[in-house]
Image (spheres, rainbow, N blue to C red):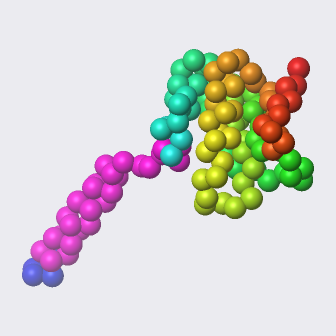
């Protein structure tokens, strides 16, 4: 009988822990970018497109970032040579600003922030 009560107590403790973990807020991967002006949420509200920010590696070292629309998703891509560092924040901010201005297919180059817009 004593074994059953201890087992039941252990099950209750496990259940409480699992409920607490389920209630814990899941960290949003876009959180570092939400402080930007405009934020990804601002762009989503203005454009009715889902914003996906991601690091990419390109063969062309001059490309700093790209803005592309594929169906109802707006991809904000930045050159990610060193994952974990936030050197790309200015690039993401510029691309989000261009998205707010109505641009949908843009490449941002390293050379004096030159733009190339696709038709």
Q: Position of residue 14 (x, y in %)?
A: 26, 66
> In the rendered image, which quarter is residue 109 located in?
top right
What range is drawn magenta here? 5-31
| Picture layout, residue 15 above or below residue 32 | below
In reply to whether residue 19 is colored magenta, the answer given is: yes
Q: Is residue 31 left or right of residue 73?
A: left
Q: Nearer the viewer, residue 109 or 34?
A: 109
Which residue is painted at 33% across and 51% down in the image? 24
**Majority secondary structure of magenta residues:** helix
Q: Is residue 76 left or right of residue 46?
A: right
Q: Is residue 17 left or right of residue 96?
A: left
Which residue is painted at 76% across and 41% down in the image? 65
Q: Position of residue 8 (x, y in %)?
A: 18, 70
Residue 40 seen from this side: yes
| Picture layout, residue 25 above or below residue 66 | below
In reply to whether residue 96 is colored magenta, the answer given is: no
Q: Position of residue 12 (x, y in %)?
A: 20, 64
| Picture layout, residue 40 above or below residue 119 | below
Residue 53 seen from this side: no
| Picture layout, residue 44 above or below residue 30 | above
> In the rendered image, which quarter is residue 13 located in?
bottom left
Q: How many numbered marks, from 0 up?
A: 0
Instruction: Please identify the quadrant where the C terminus is shown.
Output: top right
Which residue is painted at 64% across and 41% down in the image? 90
Q: Is residue 32 left or right of residue 54?
A: left
């Amino acid at each position: 009988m004593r074994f059953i009560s201890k087992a039941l107590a252990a099950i209750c403790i496990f259940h409480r822990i699992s409920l607490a973990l389920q209630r814990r807020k899941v960290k949003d991967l876009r959180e570092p970018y939400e402080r930007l002006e405009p934020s990804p949420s601002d762009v989503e509200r203005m454009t009715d497109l889902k914003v996906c920010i991601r690091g990419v590696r390109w063969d062309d070292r001059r490309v700093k970032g790209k803005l592309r629309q594929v169906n109802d998703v707006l991809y904000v891509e930045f050159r990610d040579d060193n994952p974990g560092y936030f050197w790309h924040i200015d690039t993401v901010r510029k691309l989000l600003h261009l998205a707010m201005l109505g641009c949908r297919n843009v490449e941002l180059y390293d050379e004096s922030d030159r733009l190339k817009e696709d038709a």
